[in-house]
Amino acid sequence: MVLRITFIEDYHNRWRFGAAFVVFLFLFSASVGSAEVIYVEPENSIQAAVNNSTAGDLVIVKTGEYQENIVVNVSGIKISSEFEDPENVLIRTRDRNASVFQIKADNVTVSGFNITGSGEVSNVSVSTISNVSGSSNFSEMGNDSSYSNNSNDSNNSNDSNNSNDSNNSNDSNNSNNSNNSENASLGQVSSSGSDKPAYQWDGFGCPAAGICLEQVNNCTVENNRFFENRYGVYLQDSRNSTVLKNTFFRNGIWLDEGCGKNLLINNAIEESTLIIGAHCWDNIMFQNRVSNGEGISIACCGGNNLVSRNEIINCSNGIDMYDVQARTILRDNLILGCRNGIYLTFVFDSRVYNNTISNGSTGIYLREDCHDNELSNNTITMSNESGIYFLDYSAANRIYNNYFNNSVNVKAENTKGNIWNTTQSPRPNIVGGLNLGGNFWANPEGTGFSQVSNDSNSDGICDLPLQINGSDFDYLPLARPPFVTGVDLEVTIGMPEPNNTSDISIEIDRDTLNLGTMPSKQSTEQISKPQVLTIRNTGISNVRISAEVSESSDAVFSKGIYISSRFWPDFSEVIANNTSKALEIELKVPMNYSENGTKKKDLLFSWLKIFESSGFYLQFLFYIFLAASRYRLVFQNKIFNATFDCFLMYLYTMFLLIAF
């Protein structure tokens, strides 16, 4: 609808139109109905409540068990359990071939349910996705979570610590899944039980998921528990949606082809996977935990995805990325006990940094022409086979400022031409030395190159280069730093006073932040690793949050705390009701700071309720406008009326500014 307003040149008609327009807006705003709350009892249907809702309504499902499949075609509604607690409301699927919730409208929120499927689960990783051509077909592994590599990794390679390791392991996967793979290519996967009909899905629309978002925008899936659905949460060609604080057991999260700008935050996935499918762009996976499953997988042909601050424990691969030729960032992840910590195949121009990888077979694996990637600031330790492994023409990658401590740090086969150091510069390196350069090379026996080499000028760089593989050298290997006294920096998070009023309620996800340990007496400013703090407004009013650092004789906190890149006195954020903000807290320690020991201080957050006062001012100006226009008719003096007309136009302008 287009509203075209034409101002007639007659001045009296102009102000009369203005008054009429104000009256129209006032009456229109008064006619808008308020949102409705619809309650669903256990003996009633959630689907019926959804069908009877309109935009802005809240559907509250009371405590109990339900068995149905719900299709949501109404935009702008929220469907929630009564107390937003998954323990209270259990929803089981009625049709094993359909999603429990199928969301087909924008701006829908589903929160606080225990969503249970038929017990048929899907274990799929990027290694088994066959949609490199952009189709929707994929190969399912059923309940077999064994890792598929299909290569003979026979390596006669030179490692960085002069150890020759012949590894004749054959990682081919003969898991007898040919029938399943063949059926999956037709959109059908056989059931694990012979007495059940085969699961049917044609690769279009929604599969059997706990919640499926089908070609929608701005939806939220929050605080649900998903148990043994074929897919926990499945997004198909959906954008700008959020999957937040859910728990998954034997089902995970799948973003299918074409999904973009979605947020996957603070989810816990057990015995399954988190997958970003083909042609997916600009998605963020942040602070999720994936354990005892397939890890995080990113399929082909997308990019600009961010995988940050996730914990991946005891998975076949920590992060598995295939055929990604646009920049993707893997940073600040903790990967423990996974066969391959980070597994890259045919990946270009990505960034892998600040990750901690330990207790696996290979820390970082690059194969099949991975090139122009940058790997820095990673800590890779206790790998059984090698810290980093290059295979099949993976070259022109930049690897610097990493900490390697493995019996075999580097293996390379059919590969050369990687860059193992950056230009030397006076910045702290990964082991606390004074200069950036190459990598730190250690082994558990304490005889690694960096552990035993000389650093005659104490610049943090070994005197001699290290030959990595053939013609590849680390020309600036890092040396063991001299002993320095560390400063343990802590900050306690608190609020000035408790506030549990009905309209304002603020929650902070932790009460202490440990900002780590940094050496003292450094010649450059140091910045701690950012810590994420989430503040949630659970009240009904919008609030403005500000921060304050408590006073102390030690100014390292009061002069160095930054919140989301802003110095703490300048920090201010508006948090709308029933939303949250993730803040990054970091500490900047000045150069030559010489204090020692543990420092503690309080970081206090205060808030101010934001009053929704525009409606009051609109009505106030409206009544003044009408009164003024009435009094104008009384006076016949043209000079007075001209002045008064200017006053009326001022009121009219103020109205428009407030209204729009």
Image (cartoon, rainbow, N blue to C red):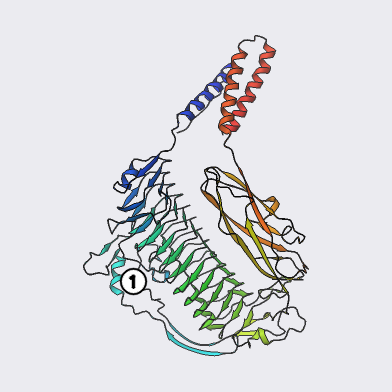
Q: Residues within 10 Å of mark 1 (few under 14, many from 20)?
A: few
Image quadrant in which you'd find residue 59 = top left
Q: Position of residue 633 (x, y in %)?
A: 60, 11
Answer above or below: position of 56 versus 259.
Answer: above
Q: Position of residue 57 (x, y in %)?
A: 41, 41
Image quadrant in which you'd find residue 557 = bottom right
Q: Quadrant of the N terminus?
A: top left
In-front residue for pair 42/337? 42
Answer above or below: position of 15 versus 257.
Answer: above
Q: Position of residue 509 (x, y in %)?
A: 55, 57
- For the image, the number of numbered tags is 1
* Left or right, 361 with reference to 420: left
In-front residue for pair 2/631? 631
**What residue sits right under mark 1 in the picture?**
143
Answer above or below: position of 623 versus 231.
Answer: above
Report the residue that reaches farthest toward the left.
Answer: 195
Q: Residue at x 70, y 83 (%)?
A: 462
Q: Residue at x 28, y 58 (%)?
A: 97
* Element type where label 1 sits in the image: loop
The answer to whether residue 639 of the structure is visible from this angle is yes
The answer to whether residue 393 of the structure is visible from this angle is no
Q: Residue at x 44, y 74 (%)?
A: 316
Q: Position of residue 146 (x, y in %)?
A: 38, 76
Answer above or below: position of 39 versus 621.
Answer: below
Q: Amino acid at mark 1?
A: Asn
Q: Residue at x 53, y 82 (%)?
A: 386
In-front residue for pair 46/14? 46
Q: Quadrant of the C terminus?
A: top right
In-front residue for pair 93/259? 93
